[in-house]
Amino acid sequence: METYEAMRQFADSWALLAMIVFFIAVVLWVWFGPDASKHAEEAAQIPFEEKPVKQGAGTGTTEALDVRS
């Protein structure tokens, strides 16, 4: 039972701290990493993209085609 208690104490303290540090590092990498501003600019332009409209098959409805690749 002593091994279990030691592993549990480690997981409750240092492993949790390591996961928090890893999470913060990933968030900072996404915000400030290479190409971050390029991806942010592309995402900011999504609402302004025009999508071609295709007629529904005899139903009189229209649906937008997603042409992103």
Image (spheres, rainbow, N blue to C red):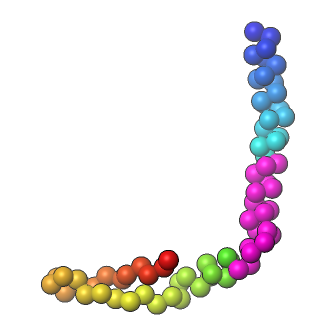
Q: Quadrant of residue 26?
A: bottom right
Residue 66, compared with residue 19, is above or below; it is below
For residue 59, side relative to residue 32 (left or right): left
Residue, far front? 69
For residue 69, side relative to residue 22 (left or right): left
Residue 33 picture location, percent across and down: 79, 68
The residue drawn where x is 75% and y is 16% is: 4
Q: Quadrant of residue 42?
A: bottom right
Count of labels in the image: 0
The residue drawn where x is 78% and y is 22% is: 7
Residue 25, compared with residue 35, is above or below; it is above
Which contiguous range is marked in magenta? 21-38
Q: Quadrant of residue 39?
A: bottom right
The residue drawn where x is 25% and y is 87% is: 55
From the viewer's side, name the closer residue of 69 and 29: 69
Magenta segment, prevailing SS (helix, strand or loop): helix
Q: Is residue 24 magenta?
A: yes
Residue 67 picture location, percent across and down: 44, 81
The residue drawn where x is 81% and y is 24% is: 9
For residue 23, side relative to residue 52 (left or right): right
From the viewer's side, name the closer residue of 34 and 9: 34
Residue 52, compared with residue 17, is above or below; it is below
Residue 48 picture location, percent across and down: 53, 88
Residue 24, compared with residue 59, is above or below; it is above
Q: Is residue 69 magenta?
A: no
Residue, far top? 1
